[in-house]
Image (tube, coloured by chain):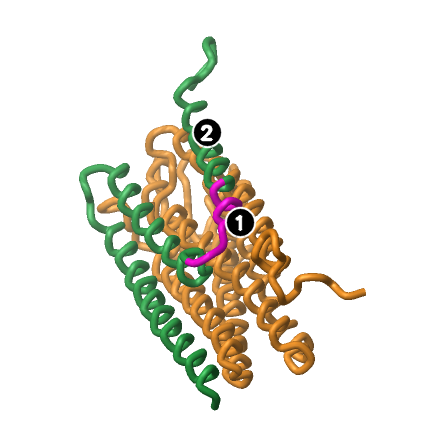
Chain colours: A green, B orange
Amino acid sequence: MSDHAAEHADHFREHIRRYLFVFYALLFGTLITVAASYIPFGNRAMNIGVALFIAICKASLVACYFMHLISERKMIYAIMAFTAFFFAGLMFLTLWTYADPPFHTVTH
Amino acid sequence: MEIPYTVEARPDTGLYNAKVGIWLFLASEVMLFGALFSTYILLRVGAPEGFWPHGWLNIPVGTVNTLVLITSSITTVMAWASLKMNQFGRFKFFHACTLCLALTFVGIKSYEYHDKFIHYEITLNDGKIADGHLVKKTADEVVISGHYVEDRKELFDLRASGATHEHKEIAIPRSQIKKMENYGPWHSTYLAIYFTLTGLHALHVIGGAIVIGFLWGPGASLWKRDPERFTNRIEISGLFWHFVDLVWIFLFPVLYLL
């Protein structure tokens, strides 16, 4: 094996160690999510917050390491920035709409 | 005609074309699932107090399925890394694992769907409600394994303390049945959004599995002709697969635990 090929293989072995670490973190995160759902944090909103926080951490690990977002080109970051903006808009518009119902609406 | 930039990076983007393509596609997928997640939020905050179900789905089964999907993500990325290290045999092994895990996920999901379709809520003429899984259905009677409740509200929060009921076989003559409905998507807004979200996700799993299966089988011949291009194809299919995993990371707590 040439020096370059050996260096290349070493580089990917390092990547694999990182992937395995992320994998164990995801397994642990899943078990923590389930365990946390059995703990009463005071009210249901708090439980939702904790579960979503863990889910966001897990999703970030998948996106950053498995999908290599941590070391991507600017082009991909630009696509993701637009996506994040519109996704946030979608979520918040829904909540704002709910908090601001039209007058004279019959509610039961 | 030669397709440009399948391997080498395009000068203006710094990426091969398929990579830009898959990220644009994933951006549209985020908006698709985002629309359904916002629907979920709207339905949930709009549900009357005490009428949003908790504990309707089997948490251990959902946890196992989550672990299956996470494991399939690591095998996908290991398959790609194997190709980068020029280890085609290892790639075949890891991709076969991904395929098996994908089929396991779909199998478990089918079991869960079946469990909902044989679960019935039966309203009797006297107002009592029988709830449970179908054992037998004849022209004269319906037999379920379940329990009676006086108020429908008792069926909603199964994770509340004291919500567990002793299940026994109940035979109900057809003449006493006012309404009988299974836990399909038509049963409630929760089940409607549950089946929509998980059904769409399952379609993505099946679609991804078909692509992975092709690249594992007949599509793998490209490795001999153009290994770099084949490796890029695996990276692209892997990005899609990780996205499917990422969606499930949110679906699991939202539908099963909260």
- Asked whether disc 2 touches disc 1, contact meaning CB atoms under 8 Å apart, the reply is no
The residue to which callout 1 is attached is: A75
Looking at the picture, which amino acid does disc 1 mark?
Met
Looking at the picture, which amino acid does disc 2 mark?
Thr
Q: Nearer the viewer, mark 2 or mark 1?
A: 1
Q: Nearer the viewer, residue B35 or B135?
A: B35
Residue at 38% x, 65% y is B67
Residue at 71% x, 61% y is B4
Q: Is residue B175 visible?
A: no
Residue stretch rendered in magenta on the structure = A71-81
Q: Nearer the viewer, residue B106 or A4?
A: A4
The residue to which callout 2 is attached is: A94
Farthest residue, direction top: A104
Decide: few, some or many residues near mark 1? Use Cα within 10 Å; few <14, some 14-19, many ≥20: some
Q: Quick one: label 2 or label 1, which is nearer the N terminus?
A: 1
Instruction: Name the dominant secondary structure of the magenta segment.
Output: helix
